[in-house]
Amino acid sequence: MEHVEIFDTTLRDGEQVPGCKLNTSQKLRIAAQLDQLGVDVIEAGFPVSSPGDFQSVTEISKLVKNATVCGLTRAVEKDIEAAAEALKYARRPRIHTGIGTSDSHIKYKFNTTPDKILERARDAVAYAKTFVHDVEFYAEDAGRTDNEFLAQVCAVAIKAGATVLNIPDTTGYCLPDEYGAKIKYLMENVPGIHKVRISCHCHNDLGLATANAIAGVTNGARQIECTINGIGERAGNTSLEEVVMILRQHPKLNLSTNIDSKRLLSISKMVAEEMGMMVQANKAIVGENAFAHSSGIHQDGMIKNRETYEIINPTDVGVNESSIVLTARSGRSALAYRAKNIGYDFTKLDLDIVYSEFVNFADTCKVVVDNDIHHIVQMSKNKFQLSL
Ligand code: KIV
Ligand code: ZN
């Protein structure tokens, strides 16, 4: 299997989310867990942006034992100097520098020319190289950048010493086949591309961040930038837990990561709590309903064999077990299963009687819990002769 590096940017792109700002001790707690999880790179922050972020990157650099610690910069000397200073204690420091490359960035954001962008890209990488060996270059808005110009920017960055080329779909615009084709084009047209690692950094504005990252690695990229719970600017980034489990559940892709997947649920909960950002119940892998079954047809299949309705073993991602949730859509086998867990062993006749009470009760509420089952059994006993 070929290795895909997991570059976690929860503490940088994730923390940019309004209301998700973390203080240094919160960032340190999350960084320690990310290191244990097995991520290859932790993007710890944007050191020049504030004294607090500078301090966080410094402290994370001292703390992290295994992962590369990375700091973001613009293609600006003072940003690069601040990042180098904040990363000076890191065992494996990386400076992440770059500039916008799409027509709209060149024209409206910088009011400059493509040649000047090439010059600034080269200078930024070369300057960062005077501080650290490992320099990642990002071509902001690469998703909407003309492929030919993007290839020129990448070639310049490689020549200046970049070790990783980040191809962000900053606005989440690309379709998976377009993004995959962009990576393929770079693999085939940039001199020296095989000496460096291409990275996918995809945003989720159209709900395609995960699909685009996977299209990127199936076309030759070997790093995915992602966040826990998919948090990040606007609609978020590629979700770490999703890409890790996609690669794991599809061995035919022949791509693997170093992530200890059993830690995914606990780190998801920790990030949600520290950031005060709830995870939606139907979120893939870590949502509350990701392993919950509520319709009678599915529950019957699940009770017979888990694999009928689950493609992931919940324990692989740190969830103790699948749950059978009782609602008005549940059937007899789910009721019998849940009732057995709390001590009732129904005959077929008992089950018919209790089930008819159950459906009436279930119509009046959203979910039937264990206490309700006791109540339903009692009501059935009051009306009918049960053999219990
Ligand atoms: O989305 C983006 O383009 C970014 C870059 C700063 C890497 O976050
Ligand atoms: Zn981003």
Image (cartoon, rainbow, N blue to C red):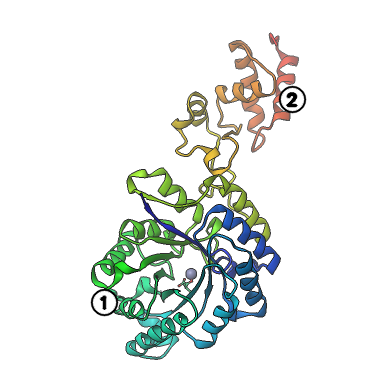
Task: Give the labeled residue for mark 1.
Answer: 148
Say left or right for 378 vs 358.
right
Q: Secondary structure at mark 2?
A: helix
Task: For label 1, count other residues whose C-alpha is less than 10 Å away and answer few (under 14), some (14-19) or many (20+).
Answer: few
Quarter of the image that includes the C terminus: top right
Say left or right for 219 vs 5.
left
Q: Which residue appears at 57% of the width and 74% of the height?
A: 87
Q: Which residue appears at 64% of the width and 20% of the height?
A: 340
For the residues marked 2 and 1, what is the alpha-carbon distance in whole angstroms? Answer: 70 Å
Which residue is at the far left? 188
Between residues 41 and 234, which one lies in front from this camera angle? 41
Q: Amino acid at mark 2?
A: His
Q: Is residue 50 above or below residue 185?
A: below
Q: Position of residue 95 (x, y in %)?
A: 49, 75
Instruction: Give the numbered dot on residue 375.
Output: 2
Q: In the rendered image, which quarter is residue 190 located in?
A: bottom left
Say left or right for 269 vs 235.
right
Q: Position of residue 346 (x, y in %)?
A: 63, 14
Q: Amino acid at mark 1?
A: Glu
Question: Mark 2 or mark 1: which is in front?
Answer: 1
Instruction: Give the numbered dot on residue 132.
Output: none
Q: Secondary structure at mark 1?
A: helix
Q: Is residue 176 above or below residue 1?
A: below
Between residues 295 and 127, which one lies in front from this camera angle? 127
Between residues 178 and 151, which one lies in front from this camera angle? 151
Between residues 5 and 301, which one lies in front from this camera angle? 5
Q: Which residue appears at 64% of the width and 31% of the height?
A: 362
